[in-house]
Amino acid sequence: MSAGRRIGQAGYPSNRVFLPIEPNPMLIPMILSGGAGTRLWPVSRESHPKPFMRLADGNTLLGLTYRRALACDDLAEVITITNRDYYFQTRDVWSELGGNAACTARYLLEPIGRNTAPAILAGALDAQARHGDDAVLLVLPADHLIRDAAAFAADVARARALATDGRLVTFGIRPTRPETGFGYIRAGEPVPGADGHEVLGFVEKPDIEEACRMVEDGGHYWNSGMFCFAAGSLVEAFAEFAPEMLAAGERCRTATLVESGQRFVELDRESFAAMENISIDYAIMEKAANVAVVPAAFDWSDIGSWTALAELTEADAEGNRVEGDTVMVDSHGCFVRSDERTVATVGVDDLVVIDTADALLVAHRDRVQEVKEVVARLKRSGHEAYKLHRTVFRPWGSYTVLENGSRYKIKRIEVKPGESLSLQMHHHRSEHWIVVSGMARVVNGDKEFFVRPNESTYIPAGHKHRLENPGVVNLVMIEVQSGEYLGEDDIVRFSDVYGRV
């Protein structure tokens, strides 16, 4: 696209001002961060899903994805597409990395969960409007693990060259075993003058016989779900193969309020919901003729189950892999992960044992894919363990449930400096706050006052109240709730700095 593209084209409102288009295409990593990761319960839960899981080395999958993206050359920015509920956790992960002085972070927030096609289209239209057709997008799921950063950067450079030439590029993973849980890419002849192969077709998750045949025949790769293409090339493909989705995407772009310099953008709910809930593979990649595959030289895991996560830990002489404080007696082929308590096994084989503060999973290692059924049953029964950990992260900090009994609940609350909870009210419970460290500014009914360490205040049911940390260190307090109903949904917000009203 030339620099002459003007306001009002492609369905955008006439009052929108586009930034100047860069003379050379820049690389824009697009991180897709969502999904509950139900097969990794009880560590991955709906309010704190797989991308935020801490690995044994202390890193999160999302943080490692950011690091890989930032190691690539000539970055314009990093776009993260995530659910609105995950924005603050996502921002905190970026902040932990220190960001990158030469690369800004931009967030597109989905109002509802959708598959990869709507998310990628929204990101492509956003990048196209601000950087032009030639901007090269590198689509990376936030929950993959890649250790070899140098090989990854080299493969990205190969894919980028193909994308600059108008190709829609996917990364193929060389199969190490017959796998029925992945899709496959059937590669053809090398692309003339480029380092990649034509794509002859895609195979959806096969049965074991077909998976064995494809591995034996060669020429097939696991579909990694990572892509590289120019923004204009992808939009053209949507125009050809999914015009209704493109129209809804353009309406979403038009209806979404974007202020100058804004780093997070909440996508318009109605028009975003109108886009078909479909993967980018089904919508575009399996239909387009200009698709190429770059066989990956880097290592790769989608960390799709506890078996995959166990492989990151070295096995002992008995084939056991452990994380945390464990004692293994006459046990073989087990994976044990304990966050806090000592876990002991005696005379057992081939078990997966995952112990968290409030939930314990015990499964045979050959059936770990069925953990998602546990989550489904918890959700159907209304049990909070499908969604929440004992420690729950909020934009302002976190709370930990210390004890939960009949008509009472005790929490440890930690509020970050300068942050505040919403102005709120509860119908069914009263609260007693005791400050442990730091200082609290409290609104209680029509009064506002400070509460210091070893001081307390009482919030009757029905009173509007707010908690704020005006200091420079974390505020830590104990909250004792009492009442006939103590559910987290007993809350009426009147104002909130995080827009949760």
Image (spheres, rainbow, N blue to C red):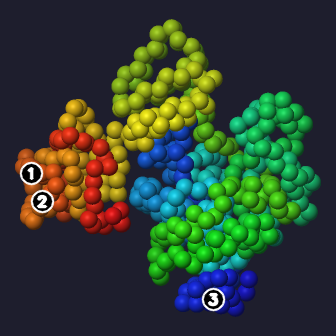
Q: Amino acid at mark 3?
A: Gly
Q: Is residue 268 placed above or below 117 in the rendered structure?
A: below
Callout 1 environment at 10 Å: few (<14), some (14 to 19), or many (20+)? some
List the residue tagged with mark 1.
457
Q: Which residue is nearer to you in this view: 288 or 326?
A: 288
Callout 2 environment at 10 Å: few (<14), some (14 to 19), or many (20+)? many
Q: Determine the image quadrant of residue 17.
A: bottom right
Q: Residue at x 73, y 87 (%)?
A: 2
The location of residue 211, given as percent across then percent down, is: 81, 34
Callout 3 environment at 10 Å: few (<14), some (14 to 19), or many (20+)? few
CA separation in Å, label 1 and label 3: 57 Å
Residue 54: mark in rendering: none
CA separation in Å, label 3 and label 2: 50 Å
The location of residue 468, given as percent across then percent down, is: 20, 60
List the residue tagged with mark 3.
8
Q: Residue at x 41, y 38 (%)?
A: 382
Q: Earlier in the sequence, mark 3 or mark 2?
A: 3
List the residue tagged with mark 2.
444
270 with respect to 393 (left or right): right
Q: Are marks 2 and 1 in contact (CB under 8 Å)?
A: yes
47 with respect to 455 (left or right): right
Q: Amino acid at mark 1?
A: Thr
Q: Amino acid at mark 2?
A: Asn
Q: Is residue 4 placed above or below 427 in the rendered structure?
A: below
Q: Nearer the viewer, mark 2 or mark 1?
A: 2
441 with respect to 301 (left or right): left
Q: Which residue is nearer to you in this view: 388 or 149?
A: 388
Q: Are marks 1 and 3 in contact (CB under 8 Å)?
A: no
